[in-house]
Amino acid sequence: MSAEASQTAPEQELAGKVAIVTGGSRGIGNAICLELARNGAAVAVNYRRSADKAREVVEQIEAMGGRGLAVQANVASFDDAQNMVDTVIKEFGGLHILVNNAGINRDRVIWKMSEEEWDEVISIDLKGVFNYIRAAAPVFKEQKYGKIVNVTSINGLRGKFGQSNYTAAKGGVNTLTKTVARELGRSSVNVNAIAPGLIETDMVKEAPENVRQMALNEIVLGRLGTPQEVAWIVTFLCSEKSRHLTGQIINVDGGQYL
Ligand code: NAP
């Protein structure tokens, strides 16, 4: 648990709620799992490769007195998504919150990008979000309750040199968010997206130093964001305090994209 997280007074605003977080094993997803659990939700921690890390998240949730479940699934697989939703409902007795966080980048300028690099990012970052919303939407519609939060990026709003695949996927998720908000609104389902700026995670550790420095120059608050700071906003969007908010893309970026 980060030092920032431990400063938060425990609240149980999400008690009785069940959440799925895709890509919950590391980085931003990891912090979201722990913050939702700290607020009382039972959390299904999806991962693809990092089984040990996902198990660690579940252990941390259980150490707080909460309920967690690690579920291996590739978000790019339509069938895996349906199986995960079915498993979670069977294990936890329902589903109320879906956080589509899993994502990858394979950066390269458009004139050098391979078909494989394009397809991999689109299938995980864009189709993966469709897969989970498609599996959860009938449940949310039937129970007339649900919270969907999609993790996109400020680069999906403004474009970014070397990220045609990633920005197309994230931009697609931004408009997908608005469409699904319209389709599920009458069923009292809130659908929002958060668009982080540069956040200190494994994804960013791989970025060259000059890319980090360029981002730092843009960020009004003068520092990179933390996964915990993103998790606080996601948790707010999963709570009743934001129940009149839907179809919105909220930048969590320290003013990086103003
Ligand atoms: P990260 O540290 O690289 O973690 C990525 C997570 O996604 C891991 O838990 C990984 O699980 C999971 N994942 C990747 N491919 C998957 C797949 N096919 N199926 C299921 N899970 C998969 O990334 P992060 O920085 O936390 O990013 C999280 C989200 O925030 C992403 O959508 C990213 O685009 C977005 N974002 C990040 C930043 C930033 O600065 N960090 C900025 C804007 C937006 P395994 O390890 O188990 O494979």
Image (spheres, rainbow, N blue to C red):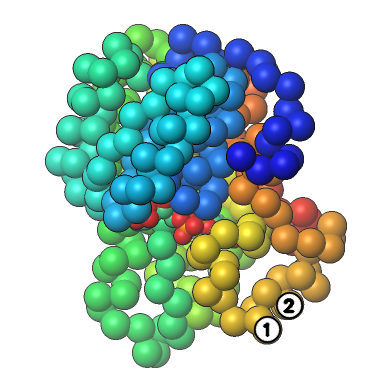
- Quadrant of the image where one finds ligand 1: bottom left
Q: Residue furthest right?
A: 221
Residue shown at 31% from the left, 16% from the top: 92
The vertical placement of 129 against 140, above or below, is below
Quarter-wise, where is residue 12 in the image?
A: top right
The vertical placement of 60 against 77, above or below, is above
Task: Report x, y in % for residue 189.
Answer: 46, 21
Residue shown at 49% from the left, 44% from the top: 29
Q: Quadrant of the N terminus?
A: top right
Q: Amino acid at mark 1?
A: Asn
Residue 101 shown left or right of residue 73 in the figure: right
Task: Report x, y in % for residue 242.
Answer: 64, 22
Q: Amino acid at mark 2?
A: Gln
Which one is nearer the viewer's eye here, 179 or 249?
A: 249
Badge 1 local density, few (<14 within 10 Å), some, or many (20+)?
A: few
Residue 213: numbered disc? 2
Residue 99 showing in the rendered view: no
* Residue that mark 1 sits on: 210
- Does any atom of ligand 1 lie closer than 8 Å to the CB of label 2? no
Q: Helix, strand or loop at disc 1?
A: helix
Residue 198 shown left or right of residue 29 in the figure: right
The vertical placement of 245 against 116, above or below, is above
Residue 225 shown left or right of residue 237 in the figure: right
Q: Mark 1 near mark 2, Cβ–Cβ under 8 Å?
A: yes
